[in-house]
Image (cartoon, rainbow, N blue to C red):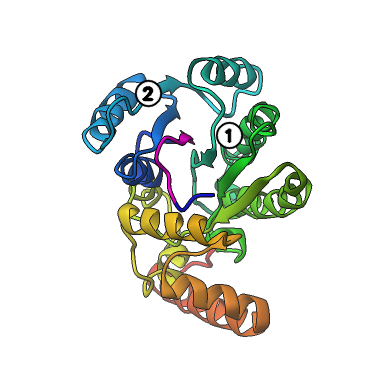
Amino acid sequence: MFKDFRGKNVFITGGSSGIGLATAKLLAARGANMIIFARSQERLKKAAAEIEECAVLEGQKVAFVQLDVGDGKSVPAVMEEAVGRFGAPALLLNCAGKAYPHYFEKIGYEQFDETMKTNLYGIWNTVSALVPAMKEKGGYIVNVSSMAGFVGIFGYTAYCASKFGVVGFSEALRSELKRYGIGVAVLCPPDTDTPGFAAENVTKPEETKETSKGAKLMSPDEVARQLIGGIKKGTFMIIPGFDGKLTWRLKRFLPALVDAVLNSQIKRVQQRLKSQSGEAIT
């Protein structure tokens, strides 16, 4: 179905930056009609202009719609209007997300709630709003999780809770929507050089930085290319990069080894911090 993206409607939430924007540009260059959604009107306008520069077909549509995917009351109405204007999406990419890494005790309920609303409820909201329109012709849904969706990462309790949920939701959804000709995949990227990643480093615990120190930071463009490749192959679990694929296999078949390596790294940092401060790490 997606050997050729020309003329296909693609809806991307979180399409104004990062992986969402990079994917939108690549798909526009393949002739897809791009409709991006995000909260900031200003960033949407800028992103749409960049996407338009990648368009290759006469009459190819590029549009943007302001939307907070975590607002369950407004998503159905906004998506209904978008489908009325542009038609149902052949491809829905749920890319909106946020993270607030910190020690568990320092993540307040409001921050946890906001993370869940954006990362997990946001996907539920858009999928539930668009599936009825997609049933007629079928299509494809990609939900963005993370490597933190299959490995519990120190400092990411709220984020991991949301991203593990995305993987489970996607597995169940895949089974349910198959009869309607709607495919489902989940993208689990490693650390990616996005504005969100830069913001995370402000509150990220030292233990978290240590566990990811040896990992390669991927570019949004490279993640987007591998995402599109996974869609064309019909891959369910799309994991960009060698390190990510290796970690996924080790976590599945040798989970004790993964835990041992992570615990060793964390303990080493905590001992260093304790030595420097003379106090116990909490």
Magenta stretch encompasses residue 258: no
Instruction: Tell me if residue 12 is in the magenta stretch.
Output: yes
The residue at the point 57 percent across, 35 percent down is 118
13 vs 230: above or below: above
What amino acid type is highlighted by mark number 1?
Glu
Rendered position, 264 above or below 164: below
Element under label 1?
A: helix
The reply to whether residue 274 is visible in this rendering is no
Stretch in magenta? 4-13
Within-10-Å neighbours for mark 2: few <14, some 14–19, many 20+: some
Mark 1 → mark 2, Cα distance in angstroms = 27 Å
Q: Tell me where residue 56 appears, x and y as whole percent.
A: 26, 37
Q: Can residue 103 be seen?
A: yes
Residue designated by label 2 = 63
Residue at 64% x, 49% y: name it. 183
The picture places residue 58, in percent across and down from the top left corner, at 27, 28
> Which residue corresponds to mark 1?
114
